[in-house]
Amino acid sequence: MERYKVIMQNYKKKSFWLSSTDYQENEPLKDHIKTDVAIIGGGFTGLSTAYFLKKQEPSIRVAILESEVIGFGASGRNAGFSMTLFGFTLGITALRFGKQKALEAHHYMEKAVDLVQKLIQEHQIDCDYEHNGFLRVATTKIFEKRILREIELVHKLGITGIEWIDKNKLKEQINSPIYGGAWWESRCGLLNPAKQARALKKINEAKGVQIYERTPVVEIQKNQTFLLKTPNGSVEAEKIVIATNAYTHLIPQLKRKQVPVFTHIVLTEPLSEKHFREIGWKNRQGIEDARNLVHYYRLTKDNRLLMGGRDVTLTYGSNMNHDLNQKTFEQLEEDIVNTFPSLKGIKITHKWGGPVSATLDFAPAIGFLGDKRAIYSVGCVGHGVALTHMNGWTIADLLLEKTTERTEVFFVNRKIIPFPPEPLRFAVSKTIKGYLRLEDWILDDVYR
């Protein structure tokens, strides 16, 4: 693994979630330790893998090495949607892998959403969880047709729990002049992702998992066992998990399997009773639109409006300093008012961004690096809250050499279409983004 300069970052500036509660960091690794499984990355994937390893084999030794703090990456900066979406859309998944595998993926994600809810209930996790469902709203006639085609595919595949609601019924739930109907799905939860990650940390530690923060892995050596070198210590492990998602391109053997893409969010001050009288939203659903580069929005526990998406920022090489994009922030502020005109003049209190992992075909992948003793996970494509929790269970099964319904899903050890090396990688990413933006621009007329 390439060596890199260790730069300690102020995680509280990375998102509203990460700054919203007090947090006590763990000490970095300062010694040489031995363990059965070493997990690189302290996000949802790494934390859930450790949890399910210890749940199934309490005696197994597990260590998590996090380069910053728990939840520093996407797990502490996302919008907090626990939802059933796999990859880009169900239709694209069916086109890429076939309808049967698209159905398999959807069932996997249904179980993933249920798993998150069950974990929160079982361990009484305080993460502001609300299970209020999901709306994918149509903001143009063409987007309405796009959603209806997706729902038609849903019904052809025999998937239940998803239906179309028309403009009038939607207006009874949430009032926006640009809405013309919506995909309605009850299986979706909203949470504070940083609180969720920190709670999983405590649960893992109670089970005996060793967790080291501010401990980047700067080199991986493979012999009879794995040796992970860190700035002030090292870990000898029988098996390893590379749970780095959007940061996986920093590992030479994996850098062409995915690219990091930065998405951006703005957050308002708490909405007033007057605002709610004007816009409704009494059921507090999570919402996305049907654009390629979607808008996603929701309410926080204290009734702030979170608005994210619209555009993404690409990376070049190993540069991960793309959290802030002023143009996108300004556009998101405009989008709030376009969606809810009564919110004109509302104060924006927080702005942030974070990287998500995107494969070339927009589908996730769990795979082996060299042999079955080293496992990686990539490609959550911005919808990873539920996915990463379930993937942790899947990875734990693989590490324990079990054959289960999870280990047999088609995206375990699937062939990933590689990105070309730089500068072609950036050019390909820019071309794909350009097409998605152009199509959105063409289709983005106001609903009549």
Image (cartoon, rainbow, N blue to C red):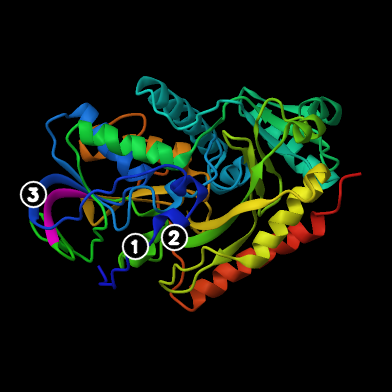
Q: Which residues are magenta?
A: 233-240
Within the magenta stretch, is there residue 447?
Answer: no
Mark 3 = which residue?
Answer: 34
Q: Which secondary structure, mark 1? A: loop
Q: Which secondary structure, mark 3? A: strand
Q: Is residue 411 visible?
A: yes
User: Picture quarter containing residue 2?
Assistant: bottom left
Q: Position of residue 155 (x, y in %)?
A: 67, 27
Q: In the rendered structure, which disc, 2 or 3, sits on the residue that comes first in sequence?
A: 3
Q: Position of residue 151 (x, y in %)?
A: 70, 32
Q: Nearer the viewer, residue 188 or 425?
A: 188
Q: Is 195 located above or below residue 420 in the figure?
A: above
Residue type at the position of mark 1: Leu
Residue type at the position of mark 3: Lys
Nearer the camera: disc 2 or disc 3? 3
Horizontal relation, residue 143 to residue 436: left or right? right
Q: Nearer the viewer, residue 289 or 350?
A: 350
Mark 1 = which residue?
Answer: 254
10 Å neighbourhood of mark 3: few (<14), some, or many (≥20)?
some
Q: Position of residue 318 (x, y in %)?
A: 40, 71
Q: In the rendered structure, which disc, 3 or 1, sits on the residue that comes first in sequence?
A: 3
Rendered-image quadrant of the N terminus: bottom left
Q: CA distance from mark 2 to mark 1?
A: 8 Å
